[in-house]
Image (cartoon, helix red, strand yellow):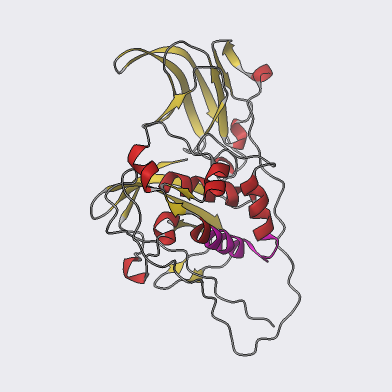
Amino acid sequence: MRRKAILPALLLALCLLLSGCGTAGPWEGEVPELQIPSAAEPQREELTPYEAPPLATSSFHPDRAEGSAEAMIDLSAVSEGYVAVSAISERRLKFQVIKDELTYNYDLSSDGEPSIFPLQCGDGSYVFRIVENIEDNKYVQVYRTDCEVEMLDEFQPFLRPSDYARYDAQSECVREAARLASACSDKLEVVSSVYGFVCENIRYDYEKASSVKIGYLPDVDETLRSGKGICFDYASLAAAMLRSQGIPTKIVFGYVAPDDLYHAWNMFYTEESGWVTVSFEVSGKNWNRIDLTFAAGGADDAFIGNGSNYTDVYFY
């Protein structure tokens, strides 16, 4: 019987030189080598290639939306883990997703371009609000609707495109993810392959980090084409590639100790058995952290932690 090789490390790295996600970059050094230990003279057998499920999509359906031409909220796909919005105004707009004590505030396009936002707080009672800026930081409500949400499963918000990870079947990153997955036999190998690809091909963009503005949203294919980006770009690209292959992936914003650096990274989920990295074990049937910004910068195991130095704040 063939022994499955231990998959390569997905690094949890703290970069000592990074003074903030938007202003500086990862630790400089060689990209960590991806090594797969192998048993002596293993017997080989034919492997079944990994087969991704159909691409999970998200869309705004104007014929199903409620509200007015100036403020429309589409609740037709809340069971699939997202809400879609479109609004028109001469002023700045925001969209609020409220559940219990949690509120997510999003910048909303004022030209009618639809936006997709995840229902990351799980099942329950939600309040959705479109608000309009009247002066300084003051906003007034334009439209509100309430909704009781029951999703197909807890992973739905993290399997689909959203404003934070925009892609579709024609996206270059989706085609690249499919190419990588074609040489894999299971989800963990897909995660490993995507990890290696991003580490090898995307470099930190210091110039962009010094000038990025509030409200910035990544273009995953542009990150792929340019071969560079900031932490948000890394996290968005990884999410798009893994989600397109049916692997639930979160984009996480939060703080990294000891300097409370505001940063973005990913968490992925797989039901396959856990595997061992350089210094810690990634557990099966659980969310596991992956920080591609630091890994791509070459952080070695001296910087690898067990996740206790990360504080998760927002999920997308």
- Give the image quarter of residue 116: top right
- Give the quarter of the figure containing the N terminus: bottom right
Q: Residue at x 46, y 10 (%)?
A: 90
Left or right, residue 82 beside residue 133: right
Q: Is residue 94 visible?
A: yes
Task: Tell whether position 213 is magenta.
Answer: no
Is residue 271 something that shows in the picture? Answer: no
The one of 290 and 224 positioned closer to us in this rendering:
224
Q: Is residue 298 above or below residue 91?
A: below
- Range of magenta residues: 181-197
x then y, percent, for residue 32? 44, 69
* Quadrant housing residue 298: bottom left
Residue 290 x/y as whole percent: 45, 57
Secondary structure predominantly adopted by residues drawn in magenta: helix
Residue at 47%, 35% in the rendered image: 217
Name the one closer to the observer, 273 or 136.
Answer: 136
Count how many numbered circles sit on residues in the image.
0
